[in-house]
Structure formats: C-alpha cells, structure tokens
Image (spheres, rainbow, N blue to C red):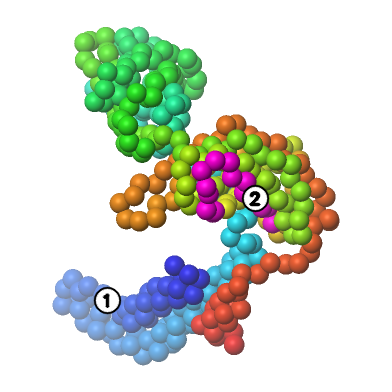
Amino acid sequence: MNNKKKALAVFSVVLVVAIIVVNSEPHVMSLDTNQNHRTHLQSDSLASDSPKIQSKQEKLMEDAIANQLKQATEAYKFNAQFPPYSKPLYKENWDLLNPRAFIPRKQSISNSPDISGSLVLDKYIIAKEDPLEVKVKISTAEENLSSIQSIIANIEDSDISQSLTQTSFENGVATYSGQVSISDLGQESVNEGSITADIQLQNGDIKTLSARFKYHTTVATVQNVGDAYVDGSDLNIPVDINVTERGKYRVQANLFDENNDSPVAHLTDAYEADKGINSVNLKAHINALKVSGSAGPYYLSNITISKVSTHPGEKQEYGVALNEQFPIKGFDLSIYDKDNYRNPKYKDSIQFLERVSGAQ
C-alpha cells in the first residue's frame, strides 16, 4: 500500500468513527412509570442541548483527524529522506534484527500446572549442511526436574534422533540442548520438516513437544566483504557472493556500531547474478548513519540472501554467509556529500497529505 492509500485509509477509518460517535444519541432505560416520566424530561433537556453537544463532538473528531493526519505527514517526511536500500535500524525492529527467526510455543508437559516446556530451534530456515540446534526449555522449580527421565529429539518421517542433555538451570528454566544432523533429509532444494521432543517422565508417561522448520540446499554464499569506502553520500560495502544458479537474488544485512553493538542501518540490494562469483555493493546512506550518529567502525551481521521466485509455483531458494560478522571500516560523517535524498514521489505525496488535512 503506497503512502497516499495509507493516509486515505487512516482518514477514512477515523471519519467513520467520527460519524458513528456524532450520530449516537443518549439512551436511558426506564424501570417504572415514574422513572419513565423523568426520562422524558431528561430527554427533552438533552434534546435542547444536543446541538451544543454535537458541535463539541464534531470539534473533537475534527481535531483527532487533523492530529492523525499531521502525524502521518511528519512520519512520511522523516521516512522520505532515506533511500530504499538504506534505512535506519532500531533496537525495536525485532523482525529485522532476527531474520528467519523461530518463534517458540510454550506447552504443558504434565498434569501439573507447575511444569511447562517449549521446543526451541536456533532458526526457522536452516541450511541442510548445518546442524539443527535444538533446545527444550522446561519452566519449573528445580526439585521437579527429577521427574524428567530423558528428552529425545526426532525428525519426523526419518530415522534421525538425538538425546538432549541438560546444559543450564537459570531463573526457574532448565535448558536441554543438542545438535541434530539434517544433511540426509529430502533432495528438494527447499522443503519443510517437523521435529518432536519426546519427554520421558518418571511415572512412565511420554509428553511430546513439536515444531516445524524449513530446510534448504545452499544456492548462494557470501564469501567475503571487501574494504568499505565513501562514494558521495553513501558508504559502499563490496560483497562477494558465490552463486550456484543463475537468477535474481536479494541480499540483506544489518550494520552495527562496533563500539557498543547498537544497530545503525538495515541494508538491502537486489541484482541479477550469473553462476560463479558476483560482486555487489551494499550501501549505507549518510542520512541513515546520522540517525544513530555513528561514524564507525562498524560490523555487518544478520546477513541473508535469497533467490527470488520468478513465476508462480517456484519456491524461493536461500543462501548463507560464511561468517556471522564482517568488520567494516568507518569514516567521519563530515566527509560524506550533504546532498539530501528525497523519495521521487515526495512532492505528490506531501501535496496529497496536506490537501486531505486542509493545510492547503
């Protein structure tokens, strides 16, 4: 949805609410004949005041609409200064900071409400050549752990299984960990799998936790990140990617301040790649760098790469990075060009927002 449609949607929703509220009439339920008589008197009194009440309600709604449109305009003005390939990154951007994340689900593992557990995977999407990191977290008092005899992880529709061992107990949570090899799973480039954790209890019961994950063969590998350099208003970061299949690829990564590990910018690029080594440039725009105020040094992390589907039914394929982090040189922010970026649709979008808000 573009910015015009978003603003119009906000305006429409608020306007509908305003109409409903303004057109609502007070209602008093009568309990007996005498109260019914008093109700008519109250209604007559309210009727005489209704133009004033309605006028006040209309003013409140108009102010609310104007305030929301003002906020939408200011938010658009702020976001329009960042090119699509380089956006400021915040600690609150959980989805960007945790790409391909697995979301655990807590489940009961006994008849007692004092014991619950969750099956936790390191990632939701994983390369077949990497071991699947499996954890079972048991929430209970430490004395209750004696009721757990063993925990075994199993990949469904296969002979793959692995016993998990307790690795920690902190703040009422016991963690059982292990690695499961998935290299022998299906031959398709991308597929879904299911894993279970069978918890053997002292009384003979077996409680099962389950989760799904996606596994893939690797079609692209980020092998190296070259020396960064300033080019105009961008910090250019050369990235070498080894591709096994020709096609269109998208690479994304997060830039962090090396001094305090704080997020700086989310970077992305899409490109047509031939089989073999391809060099692409991730770029951090000066406007995004200024939001954090960080001049570096930095490091690049949370790198993801995927082969984009080109027709219906084609599965999206995935790549990996050889390292979790790559060091990136920083430069004083004053040496970047000061030409301010503006979204090409900025003028039309601002005119629309100002028009619907009555600013013009």
Regarding residue 321, the answer to whether it shows in the image is yes
Residue located 80% across and 47% down the image: 331
Residue located 49% across and 75% down the image: 4
Is residue 250 placed above or below 101 in the rendered structure? below
Q: Which residues are magenta?
A: 270-285
Q: Which residue is mark 1?
A: 27
Where is residue 35 drawn, in percent x and y? 22, 76
Q: Is residue 277 magenta?
A: yes
Residue located 74% across and 59% down the image: 233
- Report the predominant secondary structure element of the magenta stretch: strand
Q: Residues within 10 Å of mark 1 (few under 14, many from 20)?
A: few
Is residue 333 placed above or below 190 in the rendered structure? below
Q: Is residue 48 magenta?
A: no
Determine the secondary structure under disc 1.
loop
Residue 166 lies in what quarter of the image?
top left
Q: Are marks 2 and 1 in contact (CB under 8 Å)?
A: no
Q: Which residue is mark 2?
A: 281
Q: Is residue 221 left or right of residue 126?
A: right
Is residue 257 placed above or below 70 in the rendered structure? above
Q: Quadrant of the N terminus?
A: bottom left
Is residue 335 placed above or below 196 in the rendered structure? below
Q: How many marks?
A: 2
Q: Is residue 69 left or right of residue 233?
A: left
Disc marking residue 296: none
Where is residue 225 drawn, in percent x and y? 66, 39
